[in-house]
Image: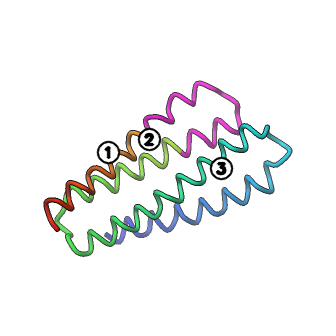
């Protein structure tokens, strides 16, 4: 529980910092298209940082839930894969990195499904 709260807070902080960097440090340095890609990475990182807070809260109520624990790790992996690949793609232009992004999206979906399954089982 505590670990997902910490990971969520770190990711929320990074999303704010990376959003500010994109708005002020990358403007005029990368194309509008890639600036939008960067913003998408920031947005999904923040959404899923909040998801990690939800998981931390649920684990405080149901500490033995391996489904919630798995969901937290998968959601964190999704942040790294999805947002991370968009950040690198935006700044490098290496288009093959776009193939990694959907893996992060699938991780997000799986993580949310695991929360649903845990809710059906525990709530």
Residue sitting at the far bottom: 61
Secondary structure beneath label 3? helix
Residue 57 drawn in magenta? no
Q: Would you name the residue on which mark 3 appears?
A: 39
Q: Around disc 1, counting alpha carbons within 10 Å, would you say few (fewer than 14), some (14 to 19), or many (20 or more)?
A: some
Asked if residue 84 lies in the magenta stretch, the reply is yes
Q: Residue at x 38, y 65 (%)?
A: 4
Q: Earlier in the sequence, mark 3 or mark 2?
A: 3
Give the residue pinned by disc 2. Answer: 105
Residue drawn at x 36%, y 67% as measured from the top left: 54
Q: How many angstroms separate mark 3 from mark 1 (CA)?
A: 23 Å
Q: Earlier in the sequence, mark 1 or mark 2?
A: 2
Q: Secondary structure at mark 1?
A: helix
Residue stretch in magenta? 83-104
Q: Main secondary structure of the magenta part?
A: helix
Q: Is residue 43 above or below residue 78?
A: below
């Amino acid at each position: 529980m505590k670990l997902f709260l910490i990971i969520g807070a770190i990711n929320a902080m990074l999303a704010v910092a990376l959003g500010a960097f994109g708005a002020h440090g990358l403007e005029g340095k990368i194309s509008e298209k890639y600036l939008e890609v960067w913003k998408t990475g920031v947005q999904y990182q923040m959404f899923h940082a909040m998801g990690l807070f939800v998981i931390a809260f649920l684990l405080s109520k149901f500490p033995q839930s391996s489904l919630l624990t798995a969901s937290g790790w998968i959601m964190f992996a999704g942040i790294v894969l999805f947002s991370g690949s968009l950040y690198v793609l935006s700044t490098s232009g290496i288009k093959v990195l776009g193939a990694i992004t959907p893996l992060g999206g699938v991780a997000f979906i799986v993580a949310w499904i695991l929360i649903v399954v845990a809710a059906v089982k525990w709530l």
